[in-house]
Image: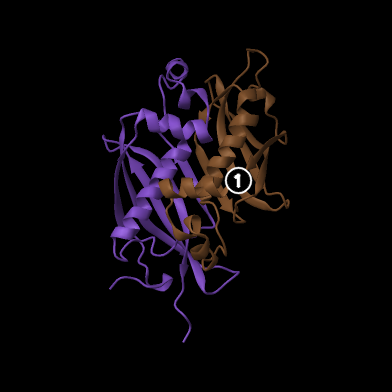
Chain colours: A brown, B purple
Amino acid sequence: MTDLLHFEDFHIGRRFECGPYHVTKEEIVEFAREFDPQPHHLDEEAAKKSLLGGLAASGWHTCAMTMRMFADSMIPLAAARGGIGSPEGRWLKPVRPGDVLRAEAEVVEARPSGSKPFGTVTFACKVFNQKEQVALILMTPIIAARGAP
Amino acid sequence: MNPQYWEEVEIGLRRELGTYTFTEEEIIRFARKYDPQPFHIDPEAAKHSIFGGIIASGWHTVAIWMKLAIADRANSQGKSPLLRAGVSPGYEDMRWLKPVRPGMTLRYSSETAGKVELRSRTDFAILLTSNEAHDENGELVFRFTGKGLVQRRPKA
């Protein structure tokens, strides 16, 4: 398919807008019950007394929500072949029930893979809440197929 | 004696967090919600992808680490390297080294790896943990460096 974005299309500085993602209390609690059952993700009263000062999503949940925004907005445009990890993630603000998140993913590195028909494109992804505060910064490299020569 | 404070945590303390077997149903359920790429949610499409079959979202692999780490902390009676570090400022160097396929059983671990003081506050500091998952053949499938906030010993 020629209309997909290939490795060559991801020049440094190219930006993709992703989202929005509406965060609900039900989903915060559901994710936390299954994967991160700590009081500050499950119980409003206990959360008030915690370092987070109120009920907040598990950081891994915020990463998963970010992945969903990425998968809905950017990945379908690209000849993507999966991720290989995340060199860095920083949880800067708690993500609360009722928050509306959006993400900006900017290409910060593009490395061809020697003789192979793909390359690694690294995005710096900033996740904003509705107050335009950055809640999460994460780096994510994806493998993108090269276009026809 | 179990460590109470950041100052008392030893580096190189390792916890085996237990094993987890990924099912296809669960891999698809997680990915439908958070990572709906064809090779995570559609067995037919996945067959024709470079992975040759369904694989788990990397974020699912991480979420299971968290699940096992919390269970270990509850079971360890204070010996877990995670201590009461329930809040984290982030992570580093997360790598998904091998695909996680349905039926695979991963063995997860966590080891204290370093300590970092905070500039912004003196009542908490960061404990670095090196976290891994190995497959049945002992091959490293997944790793990352975790950062947990741990309480410091109050100044006398």
Instruction: Report whether residue B75 is seen.
Output: yes
Percent position of residue A13, x then y: 72, 36
Q: Is residue B49 above or below residue A94?
A: above
The quarter of the picture where residue B52 lies is top left
- Please, which chain is the residue tagged with disc 1 on? A
Percent position of residue A67, x then y: 56, 37
Percent position of residue B53, x then y: 40, 21
Q: Residue furthest bottom?
A: B156
Q: Nearer the viewer, residue B112 or A24?
A: A24
Q: How many marks?
A: 1
Q: Residue at x 52, y 51 (%)?
A: A59
Query: Which secondary structure lies at badge 1?
Result: loop
Horizontal side of residue B156 vs A112, given as left or right:
left
Instruction: Report whether residue B100 is seen.
Output: no
Q: Residues within 10 Å of mark 1 (few under 14, many from 20)?
A: some
Query: What kind of residue is marked 1?
Result: Val
The quarter of the picture where residue A55 lies is bottom right
Give the residue at mark 1: A23
Percent position of residue A6, x then y: 64, 21
Horizontal side of residue A11 vs B96, given as left or right:
right
Q: Nearer the viewer, residue A123 or B83?
A: B83
